[in-house]
Image (tube, grey):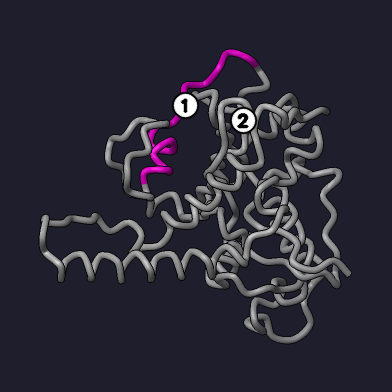
């Protein structure tokens, strides 16, 4: 598989990532109003903007190249899984890609994504993961992002109509599931980095996802994830470790988790 990057300059990609970081900061989303000649208001505005820039500068230091180019762009695994019906491509706009996947399906496997036992991982600063039932729906069409950050998730508002093609029917298994929305929310029409993922997890898988959501930017290893800060007492079964490994493998693949340190 070949990914053409010449259609997007590094400058554009970096600025989009920085915009994503800024939009995640409540103080940066504050509307500015000024009255001509009001020196106190101008002084307060300058102070506010200064704090916003300091906050953004701090967040910038956490970004790495891996965060801006997710693993799914590096292999043909995504297209292969779509063709086999294990991932459903529900994209509607050229500037983004939307997929749906059921992680409870035992046939769903990522061939090339390796998880190292001694490596350190951390959540991508420019990716989002939310429970689908917690996403506010305001009737905003996909692509019309507006000014409020939650609007990036409006693509999940409607269930896409099934395609007559066999491979567009997503195979599902267990009826007791938790559904999540994952967004790697920047990209362009030519270089598709804006990824929406609707992910169905078993209750056991969701425990690892929820633990990751609570981590913030702190790094972790496979053992920490498996034990979830020692919530798992005693010896951990091989099945539990494999479940944690598979969840981590998928989240690395779509860009929600990235390597912090390679052994």
| 165 w.r.t. 66: above or below | above
> If the image is split into quadrants, where does the N terminus sit?
top right
**Place of residue 39 in the rendered image (x, y in percent of width and height, measured from the top left):** 15, 67
For residue 160, the mark is 1
Q: In this view, does 207 lie to the left or right of 132?
A: right
Q: Is residue 243 left or right of residue 129?
A: right
| 80 w.r.t. 61: above or below | above
Q: Give the class, few, some or many, for how many residues have Cα within 10 Å of label 2's Cα (few <14, many ≥20).
A: many
Alpha carbons under labels 2 and 1: distance apart: 10 Å
The answer to whether residue 38 of the structure is visible from this angle is yes
| 145, 88: nearer the viewer | 145
Residue at 38% over, 71% down: 51
Prevalent SS, magenta region: loop
**Place of residue 46 in the rendered image (x, y in percent of width and height, measured from the top left):** 29, 66
Residue at 67% over, 84% down: 230
Q: What stretch is highlighted in magenta?
A: 151-165
Secondary structure, mark 1, is loop
Q: Mark 2 points at which residue?
A: 88
164 within the magenta span: yes
> If the image is split into quadrants, where does the C terminus sit?
bottom right
178 within the magenta span: no
| 38, 180: nearer the viewer | 38
Spot the residue most to the top.
164
């Amino acid at each position: 598989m070949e990914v053409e990057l010449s259609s997007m300059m590094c400058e554009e990609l970096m600025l989009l990532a920085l915009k994503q970081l800024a939009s995640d900061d409540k103080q940066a989303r504050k509307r500015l109003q000024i009255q001509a000649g009001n020196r106190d208001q101008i002084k307060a505005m300058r102070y506010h903007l200064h704090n916003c820039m300091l906050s953004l500068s701090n967040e910038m230091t956490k970004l790495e190249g891996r965060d801006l180019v997710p693993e799914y762009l590096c292999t043909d695994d995504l297209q292969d899984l779509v063709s086999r019906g294990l991932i459903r491509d529900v994209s509607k706009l050229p500037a983004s890609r939307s997929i749906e996947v059921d992680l409870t399906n035992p046939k769903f496997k990522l061939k090339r994504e390796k998880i190292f036992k001694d490596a350190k991982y951390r959540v991508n600063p420019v990716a989002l993961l939310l429970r689908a039932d917690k996403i506010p729906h305001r009737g905003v069409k996909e692509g019309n992002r507006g000014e409020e950050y939650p609007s990036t998730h409006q693509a999940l508002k409607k269930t896409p109509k099934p395609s007559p093609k066999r491979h567009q029917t997503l195979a599902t298994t267990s009826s007791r599931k938790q559904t999540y929305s994952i967004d790697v929310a920047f990209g362009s029409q030519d270089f598709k980095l804006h990824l929406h993922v609707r992910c169905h997890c078993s209750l056991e898988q969701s425990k690892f996802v929820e633990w990751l959501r609570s981590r913030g930017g702190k790094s972790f290893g496979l053992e920490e994830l498996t034990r979830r800060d020692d919530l798992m007492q005693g010896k951990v079964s091989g099945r539990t470790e494999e479940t944690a490994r598979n969840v981590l493998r998928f989240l690395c693949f779509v860009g929600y988790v990235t390597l912090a340190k390679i052994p």
